[in-house]
Image: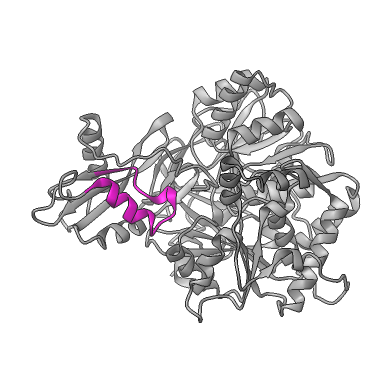
Amino acid sequence: MSPETNTEAPKVELPDWTKQYAPGVPAQIEVPPGSLADMFDTSVRTFRRRPALSFFGKTLSYRELGEQVSRVAQALVQRGVKKGHRVAMVLPNCPQAVISFYAIQRIGAVAVMHNPLYTGRELRRMFEDHAADVAIVWAKAVETIQDFPYDVRPHTIVSVDPTQAMPLKTRLALRLPLKKAREAREALTTKVRGVVDFHEFASASLLPGVHPRPDNDDPAAVLYTSGTTGYPKGVVLRHRNLLANAVQGGAWMPDIRPGKETSYAALPIFHAFGMTLSLIFGISKGMHLVLFPKPEIGLVLKEMRRLPATVLYAVPPLFDRIAKAAAEEGIALTQIRYALSGAMTLSADIAERWEKATGHILVEGYGMTESAPVTFGNPFGENRRIGYIGVPFPSTEVRIVDVDDASRDVPLGEPGELLVRGPQVFSGYLHRPEETAQVLTEDGWLHTGDVVAMENDGFVRVVDRKKDIIITGGFNVTPSEVEQVLDSHPAVEKSTVVALPGKDSIDQVAAAVVLLPGEKLGETVDPQELRKYCRARLTGYKVPRSFHQLDEFPQSMIGKILRREVASLLKQQSEGATAAPAQDNTPDNAPNSAK
């Protein structure tokens, strides 16, 4: 059943937010015909002599990138991949990931994007859902995939060693019999057996014209996102969705110089934010993409000296760390003309620090995987507004409705659930028509689950979340998924997971537990052991950063646990230093953390 959004109901007249657009930004965009493969081929022809990718100092031109994409596309065809087939990608940021993505697009197949740091338990659910026969996998994650049951494991696993894309000098340095070299090598790769080496794929013969081309309305990618049920849902994004959002992003930055920009791909490209803005928009504009397997500040600053970025997309903590470290090292950031922050709230302090370091504006955007992802942005101008997600992107429609009655639009200034509609909005979840109907109306309105308020000039701020999702470090954590793991621990009777403010006001995952009789946190139950138990079953950013024992959970009259009251109790405990943090020094919430 579709959400009850009556499009015939009286509407609140919304302001003309296009008046807030920077000069040169159009109110509407035209969605390109064709596919991502067509866009890629156009960029290869147009920018063939320009650098396309750099990885630890080794650079591929657009011509070289195009040739490798053609070879891997041919290898996929030889392995039986046909138009519409799903091919799993379990890769960090590296040239092989970019090549694989566009090779999959070239033959009309569908790229299924995965976090390579997910545990086997997390990945297995997704592989059971999409049933890919071919998976292109980071060497360090290969064993995880090989451990799947026979009926889940892909028939072909292609192993990727990112170090093979590095300069020869760097590869030789990693082989030195030194502890530091060994640790660096072990963080990036490992020896595997029973798989196809990616180098073999990239050496396939070029036989043009042996595969079909995708169409504008064909699926291009599947990205998994957690819902309130805790089970991952595959968001199917079509070529037109991704092309539309790339064009909208380009319209938002009208002074982008095709073939002359350098962009840092520090955000993971398996995440919608990194995929659309770096992998798709960046390639469409002939940018030179500098790839980072994880956003280590030392690596970023090294590249800033060698090849300064002119365009950067990141989460607020990364912008802050770069600004602070660059100031300490005396590195100029003034060449970064466009900086777009997303996935979490941008604070005034971070924005001020960044703008002082660069001399250019840092703006916040908003979106979700289901909208490919960006739907809102602050203008690149003096009218941008800290604490607001900005105004709707070109060709994006908005409604703000009563959280309990979606047929009623709320007056300006009052909080309500945000609904969006536009060419970037997806058309459904993979294999999940009922879940699709819960968030997407028949006429294309996407229920975001976020409660917002719009000012009379069109600027929008997020007031609350209708859903229980915790956003930490730019990644979504579903409380129920973490609770399922904690509840399976032999000493835990029941758990509730909430968000607590951490360092720099970044939300952290916190767990309240009711233990079995006779058990006491910190005495008979070690918080570090609880954390270790979770870490074996969940990827790092989902693991609670602190554990708190309660005798019982506050509940409503119908027995529903009141998460806000739980969060308030835990905050009081934290302030009273009675929490059991079980913290370590590993940045679990860092995108692409190599933990």
Residue at x 37%, y 34% (from the top left corner): 502
Would you say residue 459 is visible in this rendering? Answer: no
- Residue 142 in the image: x percent, y percent? 56, 65
* Residue 243 vertical placement versus 385 (above, below): below
Would you say residue 175 is visible in this rendering? Answer: yes
Q: Quadrant of residue 360?
A: top right
In the image shown, does 84 or 458 lie closer to the viewer? 84
Furthest-left residue in this view? 518
Magenta span covers which residues?
A: 526-547
* Residue 343 vertical placement versus 333 (above, below): below
The verdict on residue 534 being magenta is yes
Residue at x 50%, y 22% (from the top left corner): 349
Furthest-front residue in this view? 177
- Residue 345 in the image: x percent, y percent? 48, 35
**What is the basis of the colouring in this image?**
one colour
The verdict on residue 319 being magenta is no
Q: Is residue 290 left or right of residue 478?
A: right
Please state, as top left, top right, bottom left or bottom right, where the N terminus lies in the image: bottom left
- Residue 295 in the image: x percent, y percent? 59, 40
Q: Is residue 473 left or right of residue 239?
A: left
- Residue 350 in the image: x percent, y percent? 53, 25
In the image shown, does 226 or 217 lie closer to the viewer? 226
* Residue 299 vertical placement versus 408 (above, below): above
Q: How many marks?
A: 0
In the image shown, does 367 or 408 lie closer to the viewer? 367
In the image shown, does 367 or 45 lie closer to the viewer? 45
